[in-house]
Image (cartoon, rainbow, N blue to C red):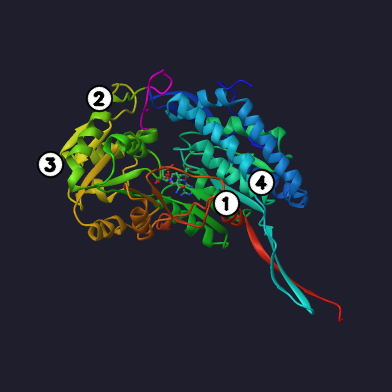
Protein backbone atom coordinates (compact mmCIF):
# COMPACT_ATOMS: atom_id res chain seq x y z
CA UNK A 1 0.00 0.00 0.00
CA UNK A 2 1.19 3.50 -0.85
CA UNK A 3 1.11 5.57 2.33
CA UNK A 4 2.20 8.82 0.65
CA UNK A 5 -0.83 9.41 -1.56
CA UNK A 6 -4.26 8.10 -2.56
CA UNK A 7 -6.18 8.93 0.60
CA UNK A 8 -9.71 7.55 0.30
CA UNK A 9 -12.53 6.84 2.69
CA UNK A 10 -13.74 3.32 3.42
CA UNK A 11 -17.48 2.87 3.01
CA UNK A 12 -18.98 -0.62 2.75
CA UNK A 13 -15.49 -2.11 2.36
CA UNK A 14 -14.68 -0.03 -0.73
CA UNK A 15 -13.06 3.28 -1.73
CA UNK A 16 -15.16 6.42 -1.45
CA UNK A 17 -13.63 9.57 -2.92
CA UNK A 18 -15.50 12.39 -1.14
CA UNK A 19 -17.39 15.30 -2.62
CA UNK A 20 -14.46 17.68 -2.15
CA UNK A 21 -11.18 17.80 -0.26
CA UNK A 22 -9.67 19.01 3.02
CA UNK A 23 -6.04 20.16 2.98
CA UNK A 24 -3.75 18.46 5.50
CA UNK A 25 -0.88 20.52 6.89
CA UNK A 26 2.45 19.29 8.24
CA UNK A 27 2.68 21.24 11.53
CA UNK A 28 6.48 21.17 11.39
CA UNK A 29 6.39 23.32 8.23
CA UNK A 30 2.96 24.94 8.40
CA UNK A 31 2.46 23.85 4.77
CA UNK A 32 -0.15 21.62 3.23
CA UNK A 33 1.26 18.32 1.92
CA UNK A 34 -1.79 16.21 1.09
CA UNK A 35 -5.53 16.34 0.90
CA UNK A 36 -8.20 14.13 2.44
CA UNK A 37 -11.69 13.49 1.08
CA UNK A 38 -14.52 15.68 2.32
CA UNK A 39 -17.50 13.34 2.82
CA UNK A 40 -20.70 14.53 1.18
CA UNK A 41 -24.07 14.16 2.89
CA UNK A 42 -24.83 11.29 0.48
CA UNK A 43 -21.58 9.56 1.47
CA UNK A 44 -22.41 9.89 5.17
CA UNK A 45 -25.80 8.32 4.41
CA UNK A 46 -24.07 5.55 2.45
CA UNK A 47 -21.70 4.86 5.37
CA UNK A 48 -24.56 4.69 7.87
CA UNK A 49 -26.58 2.49 5.47
CA UNK A 50 -23.62 0.14 5.02
CA UNK A 51 -23.12 -0.14 8.79
CA UNK A 52 -26.86 -0.68 9.27
CA UNK A 53 -26.96 -3.47 6.68
CA UNK A 54 -23.84 -5.12 8.14
CA UNK A 55 -25.13 -5.02 11.70
CA UNK A 56 -27.48 -8.06 11.99
CA UNK A 57 -24.90 -10.50 10.63
CA UNK A 58 -22.08 -9.02 12.72
CA UNK A 59 -24.24 -9.01 15.86
CA UNK A 60 -25.02 -12.69 15.28
CA UNK A 61 -21.42 -13.65 14.48
CA UNK A 62 -20.06 -15.80 17.34
CA UNK A 63 -17.94 -13.72 19.69
CA UNK A 64 -14.99 -16.05 19.06
CA UNK A 65 -15.04 -14.92 15.40
CA UNK A 66 -15.28 -11.29 16.40
CA UNK A 67 -12.25 -11.76 18.67
CA UNK A 68 -10.33 -13.23 15.71
CA UNK A 69 -11.23 -10.22 13.60
CA UNK A 70 -9.78 -7.86 16.22
CA UNK A 71 -6.58 -9.90 16.29
CA UNK A 72 -6.39 -9.80 12.48
CA UNK A 73 -6.81 -6.01 12.65
CA UNK A 74 -3.99 -5.82 15.19
CA UNK A 75 -1.74 -7.90 12.94
CA UNK A 76 -2.49 -5.69 9.92
CA UNK A 77 -1.55 -2.59 11.92
CA UNK A 78 1.60 -4.17 13.36
CA UNK A 79 2.75 -5.32 9.90
CA UNK A 80 2.51 -1.73 8.61
CA UNK A 81 3.58 0.07 11.79
CA UNK A 82 6.59 1.93 10.36
CA UNK A 83 4.74 3.26 7.32
CA UNK A 84 1.77 4.32 9.45
CA UNK A 85 4.11 6.00 11.96
CA UNK A 86 5.94 7.97 9.25
CA UNK A 87 2.63 9.30 7.96
CA UNK A 88 1.51 9.95 11.55
CA UNK A 89 4.58 12.13 12.18
CA UNK A 90 3.97 14.14 9.00
CA UNK A 91 0.39 14.99 9.84
CA UNK A 92 0.46 15.02 13.64
CA UNK A 93 3.99 16.26 14.33
CA UNK A 94 5.06 13.82 17.06
CA UNK A 95 8.64 12.51 16.87
CA UNK A 96 8.79 9.28 14.87
CA UNK A 97 9.78 6.87 17.72
CA UNK A 98 6.83 8.10 19.80
CA UNK A 99 4.50 7.97 16.78
CA UNK A 100 5.60 4.36 16.28
CA UNK A 101 4.85 3.63 19.89
CA UNK A 102 1.25 4.90 19.44
CA UNK A 103 0.79 2.61 16.41
CA UNK A 104 2.16 -0.36 18.33
CA UNK A 105 -0.05 0.48 21.31
CA UNK A 106 -3.06 0.50 18.97
CA UNK A 107 -2.21 -3.04 17.81
CA UNK A 108 -1.68 -4.15 21.41
CA UNK A 109 -5.00 -2.60 22.49
CA UNK A 110 -6.92 -4.50 19.80
CA UNK A 111 -5.39 -7.81 20.88
CA UNK A 112 -5.88 -7.13 24.57
CA UNK A 113 -9.48 -5.95 24.15
CA UNK A 114 -10.20 -9.12 22.16
CA UNK A 115 -9.68 -11.03 25.43
CA UNK A 116 -12.41 -9.18 27.33
CA UNK A 117 -15.63 -11.02 28.10
CA UNK A 118 -19.11 -9.60 28.18
CA UNK A 119 -20.60 -10.96 31.40
CA UNK A 120 -23.97 -12.67 31.75
CA UNK A 121 -25.15 -11.64 35.22
CA UNK A 122 -27.29 -14.06 37.17
CA UNK A 123 -29.47 -12.00 39.47
CA UNK A 124 -31.54 -14.82 40.88
CA UNK A 125 -31.39 -18.59 40.51
CA UNK A 126 -34.04 -20.33 42.64
CA UNK A 127 -36.19 -23.45 42.35
CA UNK A 128 -38.82 -21.47 40.49
CA UNK A 129 -36.91 -19.13 38.21
CA UNK A 130 -33.65 -17.76 36.93
CA UNK A 131 -33.07 -14.10 36.09
CA UNK A 132 -30.22 -13.46 33.68
CA UNK A 133 -28.95 -10.15 32.39
CA UNK A 134 -27.34 -10.27 28.97
CA UNK A 135 -25.47 -7.32 27.46
CA UNK A 136 -26.54 -6.87 23.86
CA UNK A 137 -25.07 -4.53 21.25
CA UNK A 138 -26.71 -1.23 20.36
CA UNK A 139 -26.46 -1.00 16.57
CA UNK A 140 -24.47 1.52 14.56
CA UNK A 141 -21.96 3.60 16.55
CA UNK A 142 -20.78 7.08 15.55
CA UNK A 143 -17.14 7.52 16.64
CA UNK A 144 -15.51 10.97 16.67
CA UNK A 145 -11.81 11.35 17.46
CA UNK A 146 -9.47 14.32 18.17
CA UNK A 147 -6.03 15.08 16.70
CA UNK A 148 -3.77 14.49 19.68
CA UNK A 149 -3.81 10.65 19.70
CA UNK A 150 -5.61 9.98 16.41
CA UNK A 151 -4.87 6.27 16.07
CA UNK A 152 -4.94 5.00 19.64
CA UNK A 153 -8.13 6.88 20.51
CA UNK A 154 -9.79 5.51 17.36
CA UNK A 155 -8.86 1.98 18.44
CA UNK A 156 -10.18 2.65 21.97
CA UNK A 157 -13.56 2.93 20.23
CA UNK A 158 -13.23 0.41 17.39
CA UNK A 159 -12.08 -2.51 19.56
CA UNK A 160 -14.81 -2.59 22.23
CA UNK A 161 -17.65 -1.47 19.93
CA UNK A 162 -16.96 -4.17 17.34
CA UNK A 163 -16.18 -6.87 19.92
CA UNK A 164 -19.56 -6.20 21.54
CA UNK A 165 -21.25 -6.73 18.14
CA UNK A 166 -21.88 -3.18 16.93
CA UNK A 167 -20.90 -1.69 13.59
CA UNK A 168 -19.31 1.75 13.21
CA UNK A 169 -18.77 4.90 11.23
CA UNK A 170 -15.62 6.65 12.47
CA UNK A 171 -14.46 10.19 11.78
CA UNK A 172 -10.93 11.41 12.54
CA UNK A 173 -10.16 15.08 13.19
CA UNK A 174 -9.88 17.27 10.05
CA UNK A 175 -6.31 18.01 11.24
CA UNK A 176 -5.18 14.35 11.29
CA UNK A 177 -7.28 12.28 8.88
CA UNK A 178 -4.61 10.52 6.83
CA UNK A 179 -3.36 7.76 9.16
CA UNK A 180 -6.96 6.85 10.00
CA UNK A 181 -7.90 6.69 6.30
CA UNK A 182 -5.00 4.29 5.65
CA UNK A 183 -6.11 2.32 8.70
CA UNK A 184 -9.55 2.03 7.10
CA UNK A 185 -8.00 0.54 3.97
CA UNK A 186 -5.76 -1.81 5.95
CA UNK A 187 -8.59 -3.16 8.09
CA UNK A 188 -10.86 -4.01 5.14
CA UNK A 189 -9.37 -7.49 5.26
CA UNK A 190 -10.08 -7.94 8.97
CA UNK A 191 -13.80 -7.13 9.15
CA UNK A 192 -16.76 -7.94 6.86
CA UNK A 193 -17.92 -5.16 4.52
CA UNK A 194 -19.71 -2.32 6.25
CA UNK A 195 -18.70 -3.26 9.80
CA UNK A 196 -16.10 -0.48 10.03
CA UNK A 197 -16.51 2.62 7.84
CA UNK A 198 -14.01 5.48 8.09
CA UNK A 199 -14.94 8.86 6.64
CA UNK A 200 -13.26 12.27 6.73
CA UNK A 201 -14.33 15.86 6.28
CA UNK A 202 -14.11 19.40 7.59
CA UNK A 203 -15.78 21.11 10.54
CA UNK A 204 -19.20 20.38 9.06
CA UNK A 205 -18.95 16.60 9.29
CA UNK A 206 -19.07 16.13 13.10
CA UNK A 207 -22.41 17.94 13.51
CA UNK A 208 -23.80 16.13 10.43
CA UNK A 209 -22.93 12.83 12.09
CA UNK A 210 -24.29 13.61 15.55
CA UNK A 211 -27.56 14.78 13.92
CA UNK A 212 -27.86 11.61 11.82
CA UNK A 213 -30.81 9.48 12.94
CA UNK A 214 -29.14 6.23 11.91
CA UNK A 215 -26.77 6.09 14.90
CA UNK A 216 -27.70 4.33 18.13
CA UNK A 217 -24.72 5.69 20.04
CA UNK A 218 -22.09 8.42 19.84
CA UNK A 219 -18.64 7.81 21.28
CA UNK A 220 -16.83 11.14 21.34
CA UNK A 221 -13.36 12.20 22.45
CA UNK A 222 -12.49 15.89 22.32
CA UNK A 223 -12.95 19.15 24.14
CA UNK A 224 -15.55 19.78 26.82
CA UNK A 225 -17.09 22.60 24.75
CA UNK A 226 -17.68 20.27 21.78
CA UNK A 227 -18.79 17.47 24.12
CA UNK A 228 -21.66 19.66 25.29
CA UNK A 229 -22.74 20.20 21.67
CA UNK A 230 -22.58 16.45 21.07
CA UNK A 231 -24.74 15.80 24.13
CA UNK A 232 -27.29 18.34 22.91
CA UNK A 233 -27.41 16.76 19.45
CA UNK A 234 -27.72 13.28 20.98
CA UNK A 235 -30.75 14.35 22.98
CA UNK A 236 -32.90 14.61 19.83
CA UNK A 237 -33.17 10.84 19.48
CA UNK A 238 -31.84 9.94 22.94
CA UNK A 239 -28.75 8.41 21.37
CA UNK A 240 -26.46 6.80 23.94
CA UNK A 241 -23.26 8.76 24.52
CA UNK A 242 -19.76 8.34 25.86
CA UNK A 243 -17.88 11.64 26.22
CA UNK A 244 -14.13 11.68 26.95
CA UNK A 245 -13.38 15.38 27.36
CA UNK A 246 -10.80 17.88 28.56
CA UNK A 247 -8.79 18.02 31.74
CA UNK A 248 -6.71 20.39 33.83
CA UNK A 249 -4.83 17.76 35.77
CA UNK A 250 -2.97 18.59 38.95
CA UNK A 251 0.18 16.90 40.18
CA UNK A 252 1.00 17.27 43.88
CA UNK A 253 4.67 16.89 44.68
CA UNK A 254 5.56 16.32 48.33
CA UNK A 255 8.87 17.39 49.86
CA UNK A 256 10.14 13.82 50.38
CA UNK A 257 10.66 13.01 46.66
CA UNK A 258 14.11 12.37 45.27
CA UNK A 259 14.26 15.26 42.81
CA UNK A 260 17.03 13.81 40.67
CA UNK A 261 15.18 10.54 40.35
CA UNK A 262 11.74 11.89 39.45
CA UNK A 263 12.35 15.17 37.60
CA UNK A 264 12.66 13.69 34.07
CA UNK A 265 9.48 11.65 34.53
CA UNK A 266 7.57 14.58 35.98
CA UNK A 267 8.71 16.73 33.07
CA UNK A 268 7.69 14.12 30.49
CA UNK A 269 4.27 13.76 32.17
CA UNK A 270 3.64 17.45 31.52
CA UNK A 271 5.20 17.90 28.07
CA UNK A 272 4.76 14.55 26.27
CA UNK A 273 3.25 15.16 22.80
CA UNK A 274 4.16 18.82 23.36
CA UNK A 275 1.68 18.90 26.25
CA UNK A 276 -1.24 18.02 23.95
CA UNK A 277 -2.41 15.17 26.15
CA UNK A 278 -5.78 15.13 27.91
CA UNK A 279 -4.16 13.60 31.02
CA UNK A 280 -0.93 15.62 31.00
CA UNK A 281 -0.01 17.41 34.21
CA UNK A 282 -1.36 20.91 33.58
CA UNK A 283 -0.95 22.37 37.09
CA UNK A 284 2.10 21.33 39.09
CA UNK A 285 1.83 21.94 42.84
CA UNK A 286 5.28 21.69 44.45
CA UNK A 287 5.93 21.82 48.20
CA UNK A 288 7.70 25.01 49.28
CA UNK A 289 10.64 23.05 50.76
CA UNK A 290 11.69 21.76 47.33
CA UNK A 291 10.04 24.30 45.05
CA UNK A 292 13.16 26.23 43.99
CA UNK A 293 15.29 23.12 43.43
CA UNK A 294 12.66 21.25 41.40
CA UNK A 295 11.77 24.38 39.38
CA UNK A 296 15.45 24.87 38.47
CA UNK A 297 15.83 21.21 37.55
CA UNK A 298 12.73 21.30 35.30
CA UNK A 299 14.00 24.49 33.68
CA UNK A 300 17.36 22.83 33.06
CA UNK A 301 15.57 19.91 31.32
CA UNK A 302 13.52 22.36 29.22
CA UNK A 303 16.74 24.02 28.08
CA UNK A 304 18.30 20.67 27.16
CA UNK A 305 15.54 18.85 25.22
CA UNK A 306 15.14 19.40 21.49
CA UNK A 307 11.90 20.79 20.06
CA UNK A 308 11.69 20.41 16.29
CA UNK A 309 10.48 18.46 13.29
CA UNK A 310 9.40 15.02 14.50
CA UNK A 311 10.74 13.46 11.30
CA UNK A 312 14.31 14.48 12.28
CA UNK A 313 16.34 12.12 14.42
CA UNK A 314 17.10 13.51 17.86
CA UNK A 315 13.88 15.51 18.21
CA UNK A 316 12.31 15.06 21.64
CA UNK A 317 9.20 17.22 21.26
CA UNK A 318 7.32 18.19 18.09
CA UNK A 319 5.26 21.22 17.08
CA UNK A 320 1.81 22.28 18.23
CA UNK A 321 -0.43 20.20 16.02
CA UNK A 322 -2.43 22.88 14.22
CA UNK A 323 -2.73 26.61 13.58
CA UNK A 324 -5.82 27.33 15.75
CA UNK A 325 -4.25 25.48 18.69
CA UNK A 326 -0.98 27.38 18.14
CA UNK A 327 -2.92 30.66 18.25
CA UNK A 328 -4.69 29.60 21.48
CA UNK A 329 -1.43 28.73 23.24
CA UNK A 330 0.26 31.94 21.99
CA UNK A 331 -2.69 33.88 23.37
CA UNK A 332 -2.20 32.28 26.79
CA UNK A 333 1.50 33.14 26.66
CA UNK A 334 0.71 36.75 25.72
CA UNK A 335 -1.78 36.94 28.56
CA UNK A 336 0.84 35.59 31.01
CA UNK A 337 3.38 38.16 29.79
CA UNK A 338 0.86 41.00 29.92
CA UNK A 339 0.12 40.11 33.54
CA UNK A 340 3.79 40.16 34.48
CA UNK A 341 4.09 36.42 35.14
CA UNK A 342 7.60 34.99 35.20
CA UNK A 343 8.20 32.67 32.24
CA UNK A 344 11.09 30.20 32.24
CA UNK A 345 11.52 28.98 28.69
CA UNK A 346 13.33 26.08 27.11
CA UNK A 347 15.76 26.21 24.23
CA UNK A 348 15.01 28.01 20.99
CA UNK A 349 12.64 26.41 18.48
CA UNK A 350 12.53 26.47 14.65
CA UNK A 351 10.98 29.60 13.15
CA UNK A 352 9.00 27.76 10.48
CA UNK A 353 6.03 25.68 11.62
CA UNK A 354 3.90 25.78 14.77
CA UNK A 355 6.64 25.73 17.37
CA UNK A 356 6.60 27.18 20.88
CA UNK A 357 9.45 26.78 23.39
CA UNK A 358 8.57 24.54 26.34
CA UNK A 359 7.60 27.07 29.01
CA UNK A 360 7.33 26.96 32.80
CA UNK A 361 5.45 29.69 34.64
CA UNK A 362 7.04 30.48 38.01
CA UNK A 363 4.38 30.44 40.74
CA UNK A 364 1.60 32.43 39.04
CA UNK A 365 -1.51 33.47 41.02
CA UNK A 366 -4.06 30.67 41.32
CA UNK A 367 -6.66 32.71 39.44
CA UNK A 368 -4.47 33.40 36.38
CA UNK A 369 -5.70 32.03 33.06
CA UNK A 370 -2.70 29.73 32.70
CA UNK A 371 -3.75 27.94 35.91
CA UNK A 372 -7.49 27.98 35.39
CA UNK A 373 -7.69 26.98 31.71
CA UNK A 374 -6.68 23.78 29.97
CA UNK A 375 -3.67 25.06 28.00
CA UNK A 376 -3.28 21.93 25.85
CA UNK A 377 0.14 23.23 24.88
CA UNK A 378 3.62 23.62 26.39
CA UNK A 379 2.96 26.23 29.07
CA UNK A 380 3.03 24.71 32.54
CA UNK A 381 2.31 26.61 35.76
CA UNK A 382 4.46 25.60 38.75
CA UNK A 383 2.65 26.46 41.99
CA UNK A 384 4.13 26.63 45.48
CA UNK A 385 2.25 25.13 48.46
CA UNK A 386 2.83 24.63 52.20
CA UNK A 387 -0.31 23.00 53.50
CA UNK A 388 -1.66 19.66 52.35
CA UNK A 389 -5.37 20.33 52.97
CA UNK A 390 -5.08 23.61 51.15
CA UNK A 391 -3.34 22.11 48.11
CA UNK A 392 -5.91 19.32 47.83
CA UNK A 393 -8.65 21.97 47.84
CA UNK A 394 -6.77 23.91 45.11
CA UNK A 395 -6.32 20.75 43.03
CA UNK A 396 -10.03 19.94 43.32
CA UNK A 397 -11.20 23.50 42.58
CA UNK A 398 -11.76 22.80 38.89
CA UNK A 399 -14.70 22.01 36.65
CA UNK A 400 -12.53 19.25 35.22
CA UNK A 401 -11.71 15.94 36.90
CA UNK A 402 -9.87 13.73 34.45
CA UNK A 403 -6.69 12.52 36.19
CA UNK A 404 -4.06 13.63 38.68
CA UNK A 405 -0.79 12.51 40.22
CA UNK A 406 0.79 12.42 43.66
CA UNK A 407 4.57 12.16 44.06
CA UNK A 408 6.02 11.15 47.44
CA UNK A 409 8.63 8.91 49.05
CA UNK A 410 5.80 7.60 51.26
CA UNK A 411 3.40 5.61 49.06
CA UNK A 412 0.81 5.08 51.82
CA UNK A 413 0.58 8.80 52.41
CA UNK A 414 0.27 9.39 48.66
CA UNK A 415 -2.59 6.86 48.47
CA UNK A 416 -4.45 8.75 51.21
CA UNK A 417 -4.10 11.93 49.18
CA UNK A 418 -5.16 10.11 46.00
CA UNK A 419 -8.44 9.14 47.68
CA UNK A 420 -9.15 12.82 48.25
CA UNK A 421 -8.71 13.92 44.61
CA UNK A 422 -11.94 14.26 42.59
CA UNK A 423 -10.68 12.68 39.37
CA UNK A 424 -11.24 9.51 37.37
CA UNK A 425 -7.62 8.36 37.66
CA UNK A 426 -4.81 9.13 40.10
CA UNK A 427 -1.22 8.05 39.48
CA UNK A 428 1.22 7.64 42.35
CA UNK A 429 4.88 8.22 41.50
CA UNK A 430 4.07 7.71 37.81
CA UNK A 431 1.92 9.32 35.15
CA UNK A 432 0.20 8.82 31.79
CA UNK A 433 -0.36 5.11 32.45
CA UNK A 434 -3.39 3.30 31.02
CA UNK A 435 -4.20 -0.31 30.29
CA UNK A 436 -6.89 -1.95 28.12
CA UNK A 437 -8.28 -3.52 31.32
CA UNK A 438 -8.54 -0.36 33.46
CA UNK A 439 -11.65 1.85 33.29
CA UNK A 440 -10.80 5.35 32.07
CA UNK A 441 -13.49 7.86 33.00
CA UNK A 442 -13.53 11.56 33.71
CA UNK A 443 -15.23 13.12 36.71
CA UNK A 444 -17.20 16.38 36.52
CA UNK A 445 -16.96 18.09 33.10
CA UNK A 446 -14.13 15.81 31.96
CA UNK A 447 -16.50 13.16 30.84
CA UNK A 448 -19.54 11.04 30.80
CA UNK A 449 -19.12 7.29 30.65
CA UNK A 450 -16.13 5.01 30.49
CA UNK A 451 -13.54 3.71 28.04
CA UNK A 452 -11.46 0.55 28.43
CA UNK A 453 -11.95 -2.50 30.62
CA UNK A 454 -15.19 -4.41 30.95
CA UNK A 455 -16.90 -1.17 32.03
CA UNK A 456 -15.84 0.39 28.72
CA UNK A 457 -17.06 -2.65 26.78
CA UNK A 458 -20.45 -2.44 28.50
CA UNK A 459 -20.85 1.14 27.18
CA UNK A 460 -21.44 -0.40 23.75
CA UNK A 461 -24.28 -2.58 25.03
CA UNK A 462 -27.58 -2.34 26.81
CA UNK A 463 -28.74 -4.72 29.49
CA UNK A 464 -31.44 -7.21 28.50
CA UNK A 465 -33.02 -9.08 31.41
CA UNK A 466 -34.50 -12.53 30.90
CA UNK A 467 -36.96 -14.05 33.40
CA UNK A 468 -36.79 -17.81 32.84
CA UNK A 469 -39.28 -20.03 34.70
CA UNK A 470 -38.22 -23.41 36.03
CA UNK A 471 -40.52 -26.44 35.79
CA UNK A 472 -42.33 -27.28 39.01
CA UNK A 473 -40.39 -29.88 40.99
P1 LIG B 1 -12.48 19.18 19.49
O1 LIG B 1 -13.58 19.05 20.47
O2 LIG B 1 -12.26 20.48 18.82
O3 LIG B 1 -12.65 18.12 18.30
C1 LIG B 1 -12.76 16.74 18.54
C2 LIG B 1 -13.48 16.09 17.38
O4 LIG B 1 -14.82 16.57 17.33
C3 LIG B 1 -12.89 16.38 16.01
O5 LIG B 1 -12.95 15.21 15.23
C4 LIG B 1 -13.80 17.46 15.47
O6 LIG B 1 -13.83 17.51 14.06
C5 LIG B 1 -15.14 17.03 16.01
N1 LIG B 1 -16.13 18.10 16.16
C6 LIG B 1 -15.93 19.43 16.23
N2 LIG B 1 -17.10 20.08 16.42
C7 LIG B 1 -18.06 19.13 16.47
C8 LIG B 1 -19.48 19.17 16.67
N3 LIG B 1 -20.13 20.32 16.86
N4 LIG B 1 -20.14 18.01 16.68
C9 LIG B 1 -19.49 16.83 16.54
N5 LIG B 1 -18.15 16.73 16.33
C10 LIG B 1 -17.45 17.87 16.31
O7 LIG B 1 -11.18 18.70 20.27
P2 LIG B 1 -9.67 18.67 19.74
O8 LIG B 1 -9.16 20.07 19.73
O9 LIG B 1 -9.60 17.84 18.50
O10 LIG B 1 -8.97 17.83 20.91
C11 LIG B 1 -8.45 18.41 22.07
C12 LIG B 1 -9.38 18.20 23.26
O11 LIG B 1 -9.68 16.83 23.42
C13 LIG B 1 -8.76 18.63 24.58
O12 LIG B 1 -9.71 19.31 25.35
C14 LIG B 1 -8.40 17.30 25.24
O13 LIG B 1 -8.28 17.35 26.65
C15 LIG B 1 -9.51 16.44 24.78
N6 LIG B 1 -9.13 15.03 24.84
C16 LIG B 1 -9.75 14.22 25.77
C17 LIG B 1 -9.38 12.89 25.88
C18 LIG B 1 -10.03 11.97 26.88
O14 LIG B 1 -9.93 10.77 26.70
N7 LIG B 1 -10.69 12.49 27.90
C19 LIG B 1 -8.40 12.38 25.04
C20 LIG B 1 -7.79 13.23 24.11
C21 LIG B 1 -8.19 14.55 24.01
> Is 441 positioned to the left or the right of 468 in the image?
left
- Of mark 3 and mark 4, the one earlier in the sequence is 4
Give the CA separation, mark 1 to mark 2.
Answer: 40 Å
| Magenta-drawn segment | 309-320
Identify the residue under disc 2. 347
Give the CA separation, mark 3 to mark 4.
Answer: 54 Å
Circle number at residue 115? 4
Give the CA separation, mark 4 to mark 1.
Answer: 10 Å
Q: Which residue sits at x=35%, y=23%? A: 308
Circle number at residue 340? 3
- Of mark 1 and mark 2, the one earlier in the sequence is 2
Q: Is residue 263 visible?
A: yes
Regarding ligand 1, which quadrant of the image does it lie in?
top left
Q: Secondary structure at mark 4?
A: loop
Q: Secondary structure at mark 1?
A: helix
Identify the residue under disc 1. 453
Residue 212 colored in magenta in the image: no
Amino acid sequence: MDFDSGYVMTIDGADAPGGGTVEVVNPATGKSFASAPRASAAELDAAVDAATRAWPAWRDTPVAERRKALVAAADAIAANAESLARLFTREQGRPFPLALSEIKSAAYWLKATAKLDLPVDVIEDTDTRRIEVHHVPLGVVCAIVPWNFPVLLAVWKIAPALLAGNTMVLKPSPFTPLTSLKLGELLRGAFPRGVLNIISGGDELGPMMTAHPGFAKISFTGSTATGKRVMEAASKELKRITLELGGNDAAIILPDVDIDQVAEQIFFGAFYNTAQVCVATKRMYIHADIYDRLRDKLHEIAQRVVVGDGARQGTDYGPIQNAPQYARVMNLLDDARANGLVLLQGRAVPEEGYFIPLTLVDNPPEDSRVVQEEAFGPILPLLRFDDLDEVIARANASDYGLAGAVWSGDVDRAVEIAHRLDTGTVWINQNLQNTPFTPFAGAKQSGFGVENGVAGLLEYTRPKSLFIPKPAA
